[in-house]
Amino acid sequence: MEYVILSLVLLAIGIYGLMAKRNLLKVLISVELIAAAASMNFVVFSSILGDQLGQVFLILALSVDTAITSVVIALVLIAYREHGIIDVWELSKLKKSEE
């Protein structure tokens, strides 16, 4: 039961980071915390049920999450090189000014 509470705490921290932070890297870390909470739930509930399927989903989720993270980091680097900013609000203003 402690792991479920830890997972809920990670989820809450991740959601707070998504709503409160404006830096793209901090938003990425928040998304990673949410993904870690979901992965932890896979393992906890599969161990409670005595099934190995949750651990298989964990491996799949971690590999997909790693690929997505690398793409997002590359996009953040490109945005920083092109515009010199990594603030979410400033990047959205650039989109509005180009239209």
Image (cartoon, helix red, strand yellow):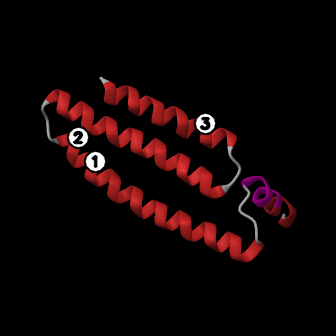
Q: Within the magenta stretch, is there residue 92?
A: yes
Please indicate whether residue 98 sits to the left or right of residue 18 in the image: right
CB contact under 8 Å: marks 1 and 2:
yes
Residue type at numbered disc 1:
Leu
Q: Which residue is drawn at 33% across and 51% down?
A: 61
Residue 26 x %, y %: 61, 52
Residue 59 x %, y %: 26, 53
Which numbered marker is on residue 16?
3
Q: Within the magenta stretch, is there residue 80?
A: no
Which numbered marker is on residue 54?
2
Residue ranking furthest to the right: 97
Query: Judging from the image, what secondary structure is the residue with disc 1 in?
Result: helix
Give the spatial CA distance, label 1 vs label 2.
6 Å
Please indicate whether residue 87 sits to the left or right of residue 29 in the image: right
Q: Is residue 94 above or below residue 50?
A: below
Residue 77 x %, y %: 62, 71
Residue 49 x %, y %: 16, 28
Q: Residue at x 50, y 67 (%)?
A: 71
Please indicate whether residue 17 sits to the left or right of residue 33 in the image: right
To which residue does mark 1 refer? 58
Q: In this view, does 60 lie above or below 48?
A: below
Residues drawn in magenta: 88-93
Q: Quadrant of residue 8?
A: top left
Q: Residue at x 14, y 41 (%)?
A: 52
CB contact under 8 Å: marks 2 and 3:
no
Q: Residue at x 47, y 42 (%)?
A: 34
Residue ranking furthest to the top: 1
| Between discs 2 and 3, the one toward the N terminus | 3
Residue ranking furthest to the bottom: 81
Quarter of the rendering occupied by the C terminus = bottom right
Mark 3 or 1, closer to the camera: 3
